[in-house]
Each structure stands twice: as structure tokens, then as C-alpha cells.
Image (cartoon, helix red, strand yellow):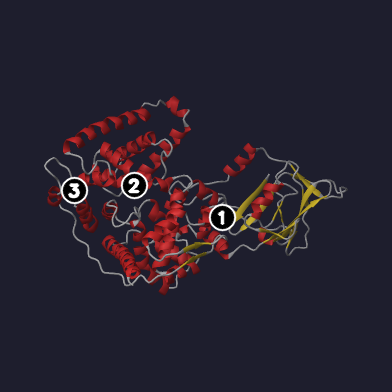
Amino acid sequence: TLYLKIHYAHIYIHIYHLNCLSPQDSSSVMEWDQVSGEKSLHLLESQQSYETEWDMVNAVSFKKKSCSNGEGSLNHCHERSRGAFSFAVSDLRSITVKEEGWTFLVLKLKDSCSSLPALHFHHGGSREFLDSLRSSYLTPEDDTCLMVSTPNRALSQSFENLLDDNNFGLVQKFRKDPYVTTLGGFSKVTNYIFDAFRGTEEQHQRPPEEVELLGEVIPGLEINQQEEPGFEVITRIDLGTRPEVNRTGPLSSEDWIRHQDTEGRMINIPLLKQVIFKGGLCHALRKEAWKFLLGYVPWDSTLEERKVLQRSRTDEYFRMKLQWKSVSEEQERRNSRLRDYRSLIEKDVNRTDRSNRFYEGMDNPGLVLLHDILMTYCMFDFDLGYVQGMSDLLSPILYVMENEVDAFWCFVCFMDQMVCNFEEQMQGMKTQLIQLSTLLRLLDLSFWNYLESQDSGFLYFCFRWLLIRFKRELSFQDVLRLWEVMWTGLPCDNFHLLVCCAILDSEKQKIMEENYGFNEILKHINELSMKLDIEDILQKAEGICEQITSCKVRSATSDNEP
């Protein structure tokens, strides 16, 4: 069986169970026997070691064995088979496809006096072998010869700094489960992974809805999508001076009551949302106000209507909870999906906000509620089920609500906003990262160019910020404040992107003055966790928004002038 294994920027080729043909055979072709899929899988799995925490997957470590015969890059592996051999792709000059009654491959090394035997795939697979290499390393010389390209600097640097113990299959693991990979090993995620994450070339173009969105928000913006991927022209505009903005104190219980009529309906809702956006809520109000902000209860509902809704939602919740509670052990043994969800949830619940008094200690009832709500959500949304990271979104809601049913339905409403972040194809995350990069480029071209020069222009270090809305970047109380501000929907739908820009704006001076490179930028951004001032961030983000809005007003005024 042929294995391609990534070792830093190199791919090593290992061919097992080679049987040399007799010396009299003039073709000198190496014949190899396929190992069964089961045996092949066992071979890989037996060498893998997975971390139990939210960290980068620490998979197989394949180190180049020393050459016992002193033949440089050509390394004969006598342990597995007398004819087995391995070499780094960087030592390979070309692969030539030849046909002499049957098709075989001729491998030529750059600097070696040793000749490699030709390879023939008796059971097929030569096309897949070439396709695997062609995607990253091979360029066509002619119809029969493929030349090996030198891996680019970003690729080499990425694997050198990303992989602890020379992990195998990190890109594949990231595609399969980006949340585990990102939430734990965030500082190690690089632009090479983002390139793989973005997928095919047609995905590199900006989504039409995103171009339209930015064109509406920022006047004068022209994004010219060229036919050739990777080229775009953005016309810069003068955004003017960023205005100073002031924030106010949190909304009090007395002010909240003044926004209710005699039947309990909320009145002057736009003004109420503006007050919440400018200062947030006092903690005593959150249990009631968050239900409105998240859409669990309508703003125009009366107190009696809300009581009826509460009873209906309570019945619905416990019907769904009973569905998974009543599954027998025998049934669960035949339901791998439910079994996997339960395993993930139990693992995540035991490490979610355990320093918070609401969740600390053994046999904490808060942990039981966290577990039960997440399991019930799997019954509510069969298609999505549970994805790692969702426990981070539920924890603050349960903390505020202190009620299982209310917390569940508020979580459902929040997930309706966030579901695109957890979709298998991750299109929502892709779109947000592209929007953020475009926005930063318009707001601060010099800083964006600096990041681009350090292979950080895709802003992939913001992935975790966007994925769970800064949950791991801020203190628990600051998360509550930020989320309720964002849930007002003011001053724009994508305010969280302006929050990202505000954080980056605060850090750009240090990053540029210290001449941070690729590694230092990742390390610096990761170390911002729990060191950010939420009020300063919100003030700056609001200022950026007013800066864009005032530019739009000036543009409209100039258009109307004779």
C-alpha cells in the first residue's frame, strides 16, 4: 500500500510489501501487493495518538530514518521489506510516465547517484498517486513528464510551526472537525490551513451577497472580480476622521418598567434597543430582557401571552427531553449518532467554564442542566445535532436564565443566528472571514498590507473570535455585556466584524512597531485572551461604524451638489 505522509514541508513515500522481480527481468519493474483496507486502516490507527483536550490533533510522527548505507536521501528500509525505500519529495526532480506494453512510473532524484526502480501499479492507483502529488507539488513539463515544484515559503513555515511531532493529516483533520482543531490549538492555525479550508478556486471569489453588502455599507466601494482567481481591484475612499463616541451606564430595572404598558407590552422599542446598545443591562434585568433580545418572546406580547407561551414551550421541551431519556442501552448501541453526540457533550460539559461558581465542583447541578439542554437540542435539530463549541454558547445563557426550559429556548434562538458557523461546509465562516478581510483592508490599508506581507492577510487568527462570538477572549461578565449589545442588532447586522476591527486596531501599533512576523502575530493574538477591555472595544467599534456612516452621508451630500 502506498502512503503519503507529511513531515514538515516534505511528503515521504513509503511502499510496503514490495517483491522484487528477478534480475533477469529487463524491465526492472517493482511489483507490489495491495494491503487490504482493514489492514491499512489498522496500520494507521495503531500509530495515531489523539489528545484528550481541545488541542491540535497530535497524529502520527514519521521521522526520516538514518541511512544505514550512507546513500544520502535514498533510504532503504530493511525493517519492513527488503525492497522498501523512502525519500523526501523535495529530493525528487521529476516523475515520468512510460508505456512499454504496460504503464509504469520512473522517479528521478535531484542529487543522488542511486537509481530508483520503476513502479507499476498492478492493482491500479497510479492516477490517484499522481493526482495527490500534482495538487501541491507537480507541474507538467510535457505530456509524459511531471516536474516537482519547490514548496513555497508559507507552506514550509506553516508545517514547521503548526505541527507538533510532525502531525499527519492536519488539513484533513481540520476539514473534518475545525472546531476541535481551532478552539484548542488556535495559536497554531495558519494561512496554509486556511487555503485548504477555502477549497476550490471558484470558492475564492467573493460571494455576491457579500459584495452587495459591502457596497451598500461603504459608498464608493468597487470590487472588481477578475476572471483569474486571486485578483481583485478595490477602489479606496477617504473615510475621514473617526469620531469620538461615549457609552452610558447599563439600563436599570426602573427604566425597563417605564418601557412597558399596563398589559406588559414593550413600548418605544427602537429607543429601548438604543439604550441597551449604548450601555447594556443591569444583571437583574437580563433574565427577562434576554428573552426579548433573542426573540424567544415577542416585543409586543402581553404578560398573559407570555405565560401561555411559557407553558406551551415547557411541555414541548420535556417531550423532546423524554425522547433521548427513554432510549434504552440496547437502542443506543444501535444508534451511533446519538452515542457520539452524548460522548462529545459529556466531554465538553466537564470542561466548560468550570472556574465559574455556577459550574464549579463535582456533581454540580449546573453541569447536569448544561448536559441535558445540549442533549435535548440534538432532538430539536437532528441535522446539526451537537458540534464542539456549542457548549460555550449555552453556558452564559443558562447562567443568566437559571431555568432549564427558558435557557433551552433562548439557546435555540441564539443558534438560529449562529448555525451557519457550525455547518459542515463552513460557508458561513468563510464568508465572515472574507468580509472581515475586506473591511480591514478598507479601514486600514497599511495594516492590512503589513499582515499580508507576513502571510497573515486572511486574518485566520480571528476564526475563534467569530466562531463562538469572543466567548474565550473575554471575561465571563464581559461576554454577557458584549452579547446583549450585539443582540440589539444595532448599529448594523455585522457589528461583530467591527468588534474584530476594533481589537485589531488596538493591537496594530505593537504588531507593526515590533515588526512581528508570522509566528509572533499568532502568538500575540492568542495571548490577548482575558486581557481585553470590553468597554474600550465597544467604544472603538461604534466609532468605526459612525466613521463609515458619516462617510456615506458626505458621499450622498456631494452627489446632490450641483
Mark 2 residue element: helix
- Mark 1 = which residue? 201
- Mark 3 = which residue? 285
Query: Which is more N-terminal, label 2 or label 3?
Result: 3
Question: Badge 1: few (under 14), some or many (20 or more) residues near its Cα, within 10 Å?
Answer: few
Q: Residue at x 29, y 47 (%)?
A: 396
Tell us which disc is closer to us: 3 or 2: 3
Separation of marks 3 and 2 at Cα, in angstroms: 20 Å
Measured from the top left, where is residue 294 in percent x and y? Answer: 28, 45
Q: Which amino acid does label 2 sit on?
A: Leu
The front one of 61 and 144 is 144
- Mark 2 = which residue? 393
Measured from the top left, where is residue 12 in percent x and y? Answer: 65, 54
Question: Badge 3: few (under 14), some or many (20 or more) residues near its Cα, within 10 Å?
Answer: some
Q: Which residue is drawn at 34% across and 64% down?
A: 502
Residue 56, relative to residue 346: is it above or below? below
The front one of 472 and 320 is 320
Residue 381, relative to residue 26: is it above or below? above
Q: Which amino acid does label 1 sit on?
A: Glu
